[in-house]
Image (cartoon, helix red, strand yellow):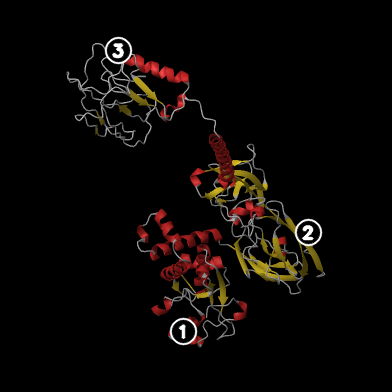
Amino acid sequence: MKLFSAQGKRTISSTKPQKKRIIVDSNPQSPQIEPTVREVPLSPMETPQPEVIIPEVVVSTVTNPVAVDPVSVEPVAVVAESIPVVIEPVAVVAEPVAVVTEPVAVITEPVAVVPETQSKYIINYPDVELSETSKRAIETVINKENSSDDSLYLTQEIVLESNFNHLAPPKKSFIKIAGIVLLCLIALGAIAAGGLYYWWISHADFDYTLQPIVILNGETIKADDFLLDSEDLSATSVRFFDPDYFPVEGRHEVPIILSIGLRSVETWGIIYVLKPIESVTIEFREDRSSFVASDFLANSSIARGVEFDIHFTTEPSSPSEYEVGEHKLHLALNGASFSVTLYVEDTTPPTATPVSVHNHIIGEPITPDVFLVGVYDPSGIASIEFLDEPDVFEREGRNQIVEIIVTDTWGNSEIFHSDLTVLINDAPPTLEGPSIIESKVGNPIMFMQGVTAFDSFGRELEPSVDLTGFDQDVIGEYSIIFSVVDLTGNTTNLETTIRIIEVDPEEVYELIDAALENAYREFLRGGRGMSQEDFNEAVSKMTQAEQARAIILEIRRSMRYADTRGGPQSIYEAAYTGLRERLGNCFNYYAVGELMLTRAGIPNMMIERRRDIHHGTNHRWSLINPDGAGWHHFDSVPTRYLDLNTIMHMMTQSQTLLIENAPVIFENHAGLFYAFDPSLYPDIVP
């Protein structure tokens, strides 16, 4: 601690800034010395102090100082060398403490010369209570520091103020003790207030909003998933009261803790843990519009009223479009995917409506499906069967109860019941066949060719023939009997004449086939130059009406009419004569036409004019049904009227009347040339 400078500046410094003043005694009676006061700049932390300017003082140097009483000795002016003494402020290095100090006017007075044995410095302790030891230590330091400064003979008073309180023991006054107690109470109050404040901010409510959570069974969640909003969402933390919490199936209220800073609150979060359905089974072709995603959660009802997202990740087909078997449906609940197995089964039996009574013709084969209408099953019908086969030959006409079982492709079956009535017939069957059969002597005969039989229900029957007395090796005429019996026992007989002739039918067929090919080649444009392959293809494209027209034109080109009368002739004999001799009467024309039509495959039959018309003369022509267009007249007998020739290959009934009214050739028949008995023939196109 530096107390003085070498030039007589007087300063007491410590570790703390201090207030200080220096009083210098001078001669008050000296007219030359006037004290001057000015402010001295301090450090920034100090209060400005006035700078004290000490006037120059003339100090005489005494060789032998004499002790003088400072009170009685008068100041003596000594003429000597003037020594300027300036006391300047010294910067004190200490902790910055703001010290407020009033500027002090220091009046310097002339310094009296004191004896050498007197203390140079006087220490004044007006505000500081120091021990004697502290005082002696301060004085020793001051005297030691200035012992070398023998040129100074100033008596100075150094005032130590409260800045040295740390060197003094505290004053044990009541005020101080009360202050200490007050400070302690204030500290305790501050601590209590701090604790109260901490408790308040730790338990104070804050705004927050929780949301319910909907998850799949087996999923995990975080506590902050419950937090939807708070007064400071980014600073709000959420944790489970139980760190090991794991959600299980059902609805639960989970204890959670929310915190913002020092504030925390315990509350409950609601969680719905939904369980998917592992599989669902529907009926094949079930009548429902579409699947509903929420139907595939086993306990979705517990979350009724809670908003959550359940949808198909892959849109399923309509339930009715799935085939029988196993399928996968893919869904998601609030973003969590899961799958459900869809089983499509067919356990529904077929449906059908049985007829109340089924009337069945006696002897007719019967199938079970005739007893049912509207048979249906979405998977398909595998079988329709009788439990017991009914008797279709029941002649009494009694009702029978029939049981029919219907089974689908997946083995589902249903039994239906119906009544069966067997119908019997009383009318005899019809039997038709040729009235004359001709064959060359010794040739085999196909007796049943052209013979047909039907019962009253229109069912075809198989006739039999009685050949008693017939001998195919002897030329002549024979009568044979065809007969037929229906299932009820009704019988019909037909008598037919067989002629054994000398002409071989096979030879006649050769002539007929040659004439038929010539007819087609003439009818087709360019037919003469066609190869056989092209010719056959062209014929296959001709209609039967065109073939009939080609036949009638060929007959008229190759034959001429001649009134040849003789014994009875067979079809083959008449055709043979007509083709070989290229002439003949109406029967020859008819015979050639019938065989050509038959070889061409055109349905035909012979028709005769009524014999009771004009001298009983006979005329034969054909009825044909080309292309299924109905029965028409076909007559190859030539006429001089070309406009009639064009229609005679397919004449309607009205067109025959036109021909009957034609002059000359038909004038002797009184308009009855084509008169016939309609009851013997099928209906003819009018």
Mark sitting earlier along the chain (3/2) = 3
Q: Identify the element where label 3 is drawn.
A: loop
Q: Earlier in the sequence, mark 1 or mark 2?
A: 2
Q: Which mark is residue 148?
A: 3
Residue marked by disc 1: 658
Residue 249, percent from left and from top: 67, 45
In-image side of 526 versus 367 (left or right): left
In the displayed structure, 149 sits above or below 21; it is above
Q: How many numbered dots are placed on residues in this image?
A: 3
Kind of residue at disc 1: Leu
The image shows residue 552 at horizontal and vertical percentages of 45, 70
Residue sitting at x 33%, y 20%: 69
Which residue does the image show at 52% across and 60% down from the upper left? 509
Q: Mark 1 or mark 3, which is nearer the start of the sequence?
A: 3
The percent coordinates of residue 580 (x first, y second) are 47, 64
Categorize mark 2 by other alpha carbons within 10 Å: few (<14), some (14-19), many (20+). Answer: few
Q: Nearer the viewer, residue 684 or 374?
A: 374
> Which residue is at the front of the view, 88 or 663?
88
- Using the numbered discs, state the Cα–Cα distance from disc 1 to disc 2 in whole angstroms: 60 Å
Question: What residue sits right under mark 2 in the picture?
Answer: 389
Q: Which mark is residue 441?
A: none
